[in-house]
Amino acid sequence: MLSNIGIPGLILILIIALIVFGPKKLPEIGKAAGQTLREFKKSTKELTSDVVEEFDEIKEEVKSLKK
């Protein structure tokens, strides 16, 4: 989706954001977006590791039942 925007599109989006939010609010919005993405990534990693642990436990149980 974002690969079709290109450099001119990104510049246009930045200019519009600068006009709408102003130069003082833009860094705050960027910081908040960064923190949100960081939390989302952390939660995704935790969820993935939980699923992998559950899968490994079930795999070990199946191995022990086969013996």
Image: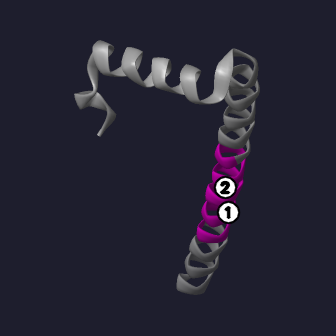
Q: Residue at left 54%, top 26%? A: 17
Q: Secondary structure at mark 1?
A: helix
Residue 12, given in percent of the width and then of the height, sits at 38, 19
Q: Which residue is mark 2?
A: 49
Residue 49, given in percent of the width and then of the height, sits at 66, 55
Query: Is 54 in front, or is 1?
Result: 1
Q: Is residue 3 above or below residue 52?
A: above
Q: Is residue 43 above or below residue 24?
A: below
Frontmost of labels 2 and 1 is 2
Contact check, label 2 and label 1, Cβ < 8 Å? yes
Q: Quadrant of the N terminus?
A: top left
Residue at the far front: name it: 19
**Dot 1 crowding, Cα within 10 Å, few <14, some 14–19, many 20+:** few
Q: Secondary structure at mark 2?
A: helix
- The stretch of residues the image draws in magenta is 40-55
Overall secondary structure of the magenta section: helix
Q: Residue at left 61%, top 57%? A: 48
Q: Quadrant of the C terminus?
A: bottom right
The quadrant in which residue 65 appears is bottom right
Residue at the far bottom: name it: 65
The quadrant in which residue 52 appears is bottom right
Q: Which residue is mark 1?
A: 53
